[in-house]
Image (spheres, helix red, strand yellow):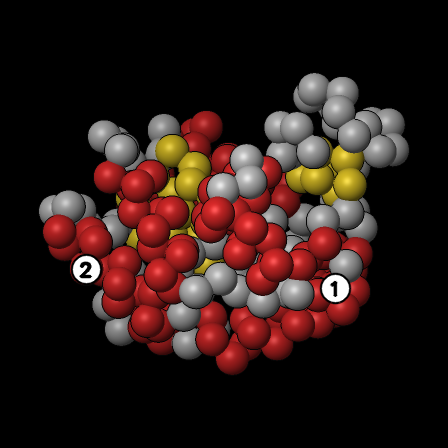
Amino acid sequence: MKLIVLGPPGTGKGTISRFIEAKFGCEHISTGDLLRNEVAIKTSIGKKIRYILNKGKLVSNEIAMQVLSKKICSLKDGFVLDGFPRNIEQARLFDELLIKQKISLDLVLEVDSDDKVVIERLSSRRQCVNCKRIYGHHVPSKKVGVCDDCGSKTIIREDDKPKAIKQRLKIYHETTKPLVDFYSNKKLLLKINGNRTLEKIFPQIEKIFKKVV
């Protein structure tokens, strides 16, 4: 199974993708984590990415494709792609990559949420500095500021701070939302209500995938 998960920031795309990975064996690929890893290991491209993310902006298509291409080409089985593509040009570039690798997408899942819900979720979100697990309003860590999995510190990411959130939503509506029509025209899009808690979303996704797989 090869799919993309779309939706505004704060809709739980990463958690949903990990659920799909566990249930259906698709490797979860988070472009956000791939990019932040470049930042963490302080590569030359990572320094550029850090500046861009801290401003609440998106990295260039060239940078995104460079990082993602290497990962996609290393996979042997299915994948669930979270956080990419973010605009029509990236979608077309990704199509070219898939064609080159003789890979076909099976589904594009849109997790649709209201801006008000997104802002509430992101303002309470924390991420582990070590294993990168994300905690939020509905899924908090057992101890505030400490990761349940590895015991490392959890922090508010720079791109989850108020000013950056508003900029991210603005960019989403201007550049990423058009992907809904792009993939709908390809008969790949399926929309679900992302305003609900993950506990209510998971059973619906499981039913959908059992029909598709």
User: Mark 1 falls on what kind of element?
Assistant: helix
Residue 177, compared with residue 212, is above or below; it is: below
For the point 41% across and 70% down, the residue is: 87
Q: Nearer the viewer, residue 12 or 63?
A: 63
Q: Is residue 113 visible?
A: no
Q: Position of residue 17 (x, y in %)?
A: 48, 41
State which quadrant residue 15 falls in: top right
Q: Nearer the viewer, residue 135 or 62?
A: 62
Residue 181, compared with residue 16, is above or below; it is: below
State left or right for residue 1 relative to residue 145: left
Q: Amino acid at mark 1?
A: Ile
Q: Which residue is mark 1?
A: 119
Q: Position of residue 108 (x, y in %)?
A: 36, 56
Q: Earlier in the sequence, mark 2 or mark 1?
A: 2
Residue 47, compared with residue 70, is above or below; it is: below
Q: Amino acid at mark 2?
A: Glu
